[in-house]
Amino acid sequence: MPDDLDAVLAQLQQVILGKKRTLRLALCCLLARGHLLIEDIPGVGKTTLASGLARCLGLNLRRVQFTSDLLPADIVGNVIFDRERNQFVFHAGAIFAQVVLADEINRASPKTQSALLEAMEERQVTVDGQSHALPAPFFVIATQNPHHQIGTFPLPESQLDRFLMRIDLGYPDREAEREMLTGPDRRSVVEAITPALTSDRLVALQRLVPTVHVAPALLDYLLDLLAHTRIHRPAGSGLSPRAGLALQRAAQSWALMAGRDMVVPEDVQEVAVSVMGHRLRGMVNDGSPDGRALAEQVIRTVAVP
């Protein structure tokens, strides 16, 4: 792994204890120019992780607390008449930042959630017929509470598909939690972080990701995974071509982080559940919906060429 990426991971591990692989997935997602969805119960460090990522990468962060009364204009901005200039002037919303933390995104209404669709796909927003480019690099890191909690709205499939990966943090192990209880406050640890990357270096690394070689046999493996979800239909309509592109890009990013210039099947398997899980809908053996379990089932079933 490049030394500066190693430094980013080392800093993140001081913020979120005992979750090395999860942190690696989060960094992999951002290197692949994807957006990240973090789903878990309140209090396990979702917002802390997002803040730590932004500081480690030297990017400006804006946090938007999603609530039931949040309006789309609060996110993208609106046009207001300026009497002094005698014209309408665009006032940028909270989305005009390099990293946007959409905190508890599923507590806002579907109408407000949809305000992110154009920004996440095209990295621009359109207000009153005028398009406005967003900063580069641009990431959305969204946190989501479990669907069974009161006051949540499920994210529509079109919104979920905009996220390259979905990860969860879960509870820390006993030793990590002991260190958390006896150590410094997590907020002070985040504030003490000094950027390990410049935005220019981050963009340069992002441009390297598509150059990581994907052999024809590896492409066949990716296509077999996609075809399995469509033919056997354990997950509704199966994975879309966009999901296939996301899986390839994430695998290339994982390979780059491992210091390799080509993708191997293990790279695909490492990222597959995080890329596929939130895109799969269906029923597992015990009768409960679980996209993660479905993704794991697909990986176990499809043979490596």
Image (cartoon, rainbow, N blue to C red):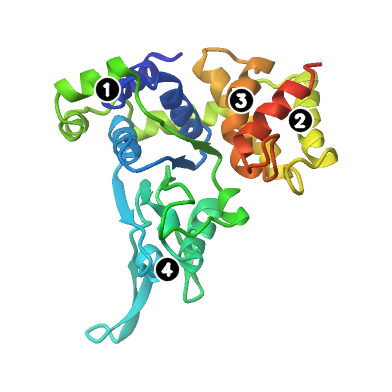
Is any atom of residue 210 visible in this view? no
Number of callouts: 4
Residue 163 drawn at (x, y percent): 54, 44
Whichever of labels 4 and 1 marks the residue nearer the N terminus, that label is 4
Report how far apart the C-alphas of labels 3 and 1 lie in the structure: 31 Å
x 30%, y 51%: residue: 63
Residue 293 drawn at (x, y percent): 63, 32
Relative to residue 126, is residue 54 depicted above or below? above
x 56%, y 40%: residue: 164
Whichever of labels 4 and 2 marks the residue nearer the N terminus, that label is 4
For mark 2, give the secondary structure.
Answer: helix
Residue sitting nearer the eye, 67 or 294: 294
Q: Are marks 4 and 3 in contact (CB under 8 Å)?
A: no
Relative to residue 295, is residue 267 depicted above or below? above
Q: Which mark is residue 225?
A: 2
Tag 3 residue: 251
Q: Are marks 2 and 1 in contact (CB under 8 Å)?
A: no
**Residue 58 appears in which quarter of the rendering?**
top left
Whichever of labels 3 and 1 marks the residue nearer the N terminus, that label is 1
For mark 1, give the secondary structure.
Answer: helix
> Which of pointers 4 and 1 indicates the residue nearer the eye?
1
Residue 210 drawn at (x, y percent): 61, 29
x 47%, y 42%: residue: 37
Tag 4 residue: 72
Report how far apart the C-alphas of labels 4 and 1 lie in the structure: 38 Å
Report how far apart the C-alphas of labels 2 and 1 lie in the structure: 37 Å
Residue sitting nearer the eye, 72 or 84: 72
Tag 1 residue: 177
Whichever of labels 3 and 2 marks the residue nearer the N terminus, that label is 2
> Label 4 sits on what residue type?
Pro
Q: Residues within 10 Å of mark 4 (few under 14, many from 20)?
A: some
Is any atom of residue 259 visible in this view? yes
